[in-house]
Amino acid sequence: MERKILHVDQNCFFASVEMKNHPELRGVPMAVGGDQDQRHGIILAKNPLAGACGIKTAETIWQAKQKCPDLVVVPGHYDQYTYYSRKAFEMFCQYTDRVESFGLDECWLDVTDICGSASLPVLADEIRSRIKKELGLTCSVGASFNKSFAKLGSDYKKPDATTLILQDNFKNIVWPLPVGDLLYAGRSTQKRLSRINIHTIGQLAALPHEYIRSYLGKNGEGLWICANGLDASPVGLCSDQREIKSVGNSTTTARDMTCNEDVWKTIVALSDQVATRLRKYKLVCNTVQIHVRDTELHTYERQQHLLAPTDAAGEISRVAMDLFQRSYDWTKSVRSFGVRAAQVNPAEARRQISLFDSSYQTDEKKAVDTVVDALRIRFGKDIVRKGIQLAGGDELLPQGQMGWNAGGFASLKTGGREE
Ligand SMILES: [Mg+2]
């Protein structure tokens, strides 16, 4: 039976979430920037007014401001993006158990079992209007008989539109499009295809199957299959995936870090945020990763697998510091630092703890984390700060980015290195 597949793509996702939370940003050219102090920041997302000024995703904030001096650049709020992403995912799971996310702002839905062909555009429009009503965001939807054409459809008309790509119209809609519009048609593949004068999806589709396989290998063959409307890849199951693969925070500090103590303060602040988010999503991590960039912009990453999964800030910061001390020689100062909790699982699975692990948090430490979370939910995240942050950790952190600088008073000191 022919499948019915939708691809939902939230339009200008990060920028739209910012505009929803701050409606005053709707009327000005606005972009989400990757770095608060704008020394090394790039544009992560932009609103339509900024797009009209010629601003492109991934260019530097500096370049963007040359084009549009009035551009308002706001820092990203990943908790918010994850929140809306999860809300949309949950909505899609009400329709079918086959929902597969692709990044934070895109999902495929296999709705074969719940609609006939006549109702496919009706369902697509219903989802668009629910996203608008329930989340206050806009999306475009592609509806087709396979995943790759559904994805092309959501790109075809936007924002806030539905595009149907069916057996009887796909040659008219899809084949004139550039080959690069196909998912996984990378730049080098496009170059190789243009060398043999293949520029559109239709031209690719018309090549003999054997020829494209020998010319481009397996990846090229996959593209050829998609171009011909023969993509049979299934939409994953809701239950197979967690939209959250890892939880991380990073910062470029207000001044360069010059000693272990500076780095430790930053690690404590970052780990505290990471752990709070893990607990909010009821996740535990099995791996801690650090990301270090020095003043020469040399960057490296290190990771450590944990003996037992955790959602405790103390454990995450301890492992992060250990990784740092084992890997850094201090020939240069440190400019930016990231802490990431990876290989995350639902917290219910945490009880498979290692018998050999003495670092597993005691119930007492767990209780402190729970109290801290509850206080923050009621009174805001500034209500509880770590002792080390009170002792001067904050001066390193850029204003606003970490959220610890606005007001705030401490009511509970949870200590420095040991929570
Ligand atoms: Mg999008």
Image (cartoon, rainbow, N blue to C red):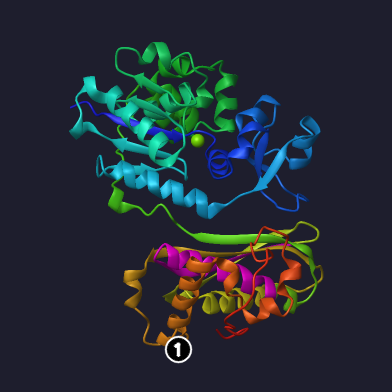
Q: Foreground residue, 15 or 328?
A: 15
* Residue 308 left/right relative to 256: left
- Density class for disc 1 (Cα within 10 Å; few <14, some 14-19, many ≥20) is few
**Residue at the disc numbered 1:** 358
* Residue 169 left/right relative to 26: left
Task: Find out whether residue 276 is within the magenta segment.
Answer: yes
| Image quadrant assignment for residue 130 | top left
Q: Which stretch is magenta? A: 265-293
Q: Picture coordinates of residue 105 (x, y %)?
A: 47, 41
Q: Picture coordinates of residue 96 (x, y %)?
A: 24, 41
Measured along the vertical axis of the image, is residue 253 above or below residue 272? Answer: above
Q: Foreground residue, 381 or 41?
A: 381
Q: Picture coordinates of residue 50 (x, y %)?
A: 67, 31
Q: Which amino acid does label 1 sit on?
A: Ser
Q: Which quadrant would the N terminus be assigned to in this image? A: top left
* Residue 210 left/right relative to 66: left
Q: Residue at x 78, y 51 (%)?
A: 39
User: Looking at the image, can residue 419 be seen?
Assistant: yes
* Ligand 1 has an atom within 8 Å of the beta carbon of the residue at disc 1: no
| Image quadrant assignment for residue 251 | bottom right
Q: Which quadrant would the C terminus be assigned to in this image? A: bottom right
* Residue 222 left/right relative to 379: left
Measured along the vertical axis of the image, is residue 287 above or below residue 159? Answer: below
Q: Which residue is drawn at 38% across and 40% down?
A: 134
Q: Which residue is drawn at 68% across and 58% down?
A: 400
Measured along the vertical axis of the image, is residue 351 above or below residue 63? Answer: below
Q: How many marks?
A: 1
Secondary structure of the residue carrying numbered label 1: loop
Q: Picture coordinates of residue 51 (x, y %)?
A: 65, 28
Task: Find out whether residue 193 is within the magenta segment.
Answer: no
User: Looking at the image, can residue 46 be seen?
Assistant: no
